[in-house]
Amino acid sequence: MPQELYVPAISLKDFESRKEEITKQLVEGAETAGFFTLVDHGITIEEIENQFALSKAFFALPREIKGKIPHGLHTNNGWEYKSQIRPSTGVPDQKESFWLQRNSQWPADEDVPGFSEGTKNFIAKCEGISKQVLSCLSIALGFPENHFNDAMDVEASDNLTQMRMIHYMASENAAGTWRAGNHTDVGCLTLLFQRDGEDGLEVCPGRKNHNDKIIGDDFSPIPAKTGPIVVNIGDMLMAWSDDRLKANFHRVRAQDVGPSPDRYSIAYFNTGRRNVVMQGPLKKYPAITCGEYFREKTVVQFGHNFPKTQSPLVTDAPMATMAAVATPAA
């Protein structure tokens, strides 16, 4: 039976005047659960619902239309379908997803009216919220205030930050199984949007270091609600903080009883730029570029997914996880 886990809800209201208070609250969540939720963040319920409507419209398209933007191994952008196999399950995650960056290929307006304009506006909102949180975490770790924001500059040519729209297909016979297996996110900071009633996200606290592969049994649910943003720490930021901030394992689980409905989520992955050198304030680990760190973590988590003819070590793909031949998050 899932255990209760304290995941703080943090208001970003009056951010500048409350920055010290907010920083303390963010660090508390990041050091324990590795998860927290944000409220009063500036994205309205209507804006979130509109973005989910665009996501649903895309996923409702025929396969041949979605397939006009296939997932690319070297970019990690595009549409993929049930292609991600995690070591923890050995079977494909029961979902499809669409990865995007600022300069990637977007659906045509004739296929999904308003997709490009609406999604770019939504991404800009995510960028703004991310900057607030990352500035607080920079200060808390003893770095200059802009340390992480400079390292994750989305306008830089080596930018790795992405958005992922996800659709978990409804299932009649999946009670108690995993729609997405146990995993950690490879990048720095994930912003996750969920919808009322589409539960399934569960978190297991207790990870000691960013290379720890031990997964416990005490998973706790984080209810799906439209409005609050669920934020979690990724492996890269855990290493960058000398393991102070926790990138804990999480999964998406089907309902224990009865059929599981469709679940839609949207994840915004803040990831260090490929050529930026990362090292924690205590220098617990050797300095390494974000690109190399990302590549190494991807091979550990998802190397079994790569085609036998393709070595992931030679690609510089901007992956929020370069998982699967076609492609973490919840």
Image (cartoon, rainbow, N blue to C red):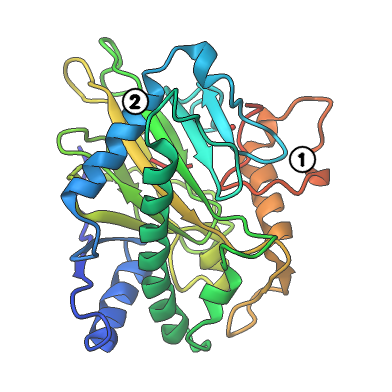
Residue of label 2: 57
Give x and y (percent) for residue 83.
56, 23
The disc label shown at residue 312, or none = 1
Which one is nearer the viewer's eye here, 289 or 111?
Answer: 111
Give x and y (percent) for residue 45.
17, 49
**Is residue 203 placed above or below 252 in the rendered structure?**
below
Give x and y (percent) for residue 80.
54, 26
**Is residue 151 placed above or below 320 in the rendered structure?**
below
Give the quarter of the image for residue 306: top right
In the picture, which quadrant includes the C terminus? Answer: top left
Side (left or right) of 288 relative to 229:
right
Which one is nearer the viewer's eye here, 194 or 98?
Answer: 98
Q: Secondary structure at mark 2?
A: helix
Q: Secondary structure at mark 1?
A: helix
Look at 30% across and 68% down and name the residue there.
29
Q: Amino acid at mark 1?
A: Pro
In the picture, which quadrant includes the N terminus? Answer: top left
Look at 67% across and 32% down and name the residue there.
72
Alpha carbons under labels 2 and 1: distance apart? 33 Å
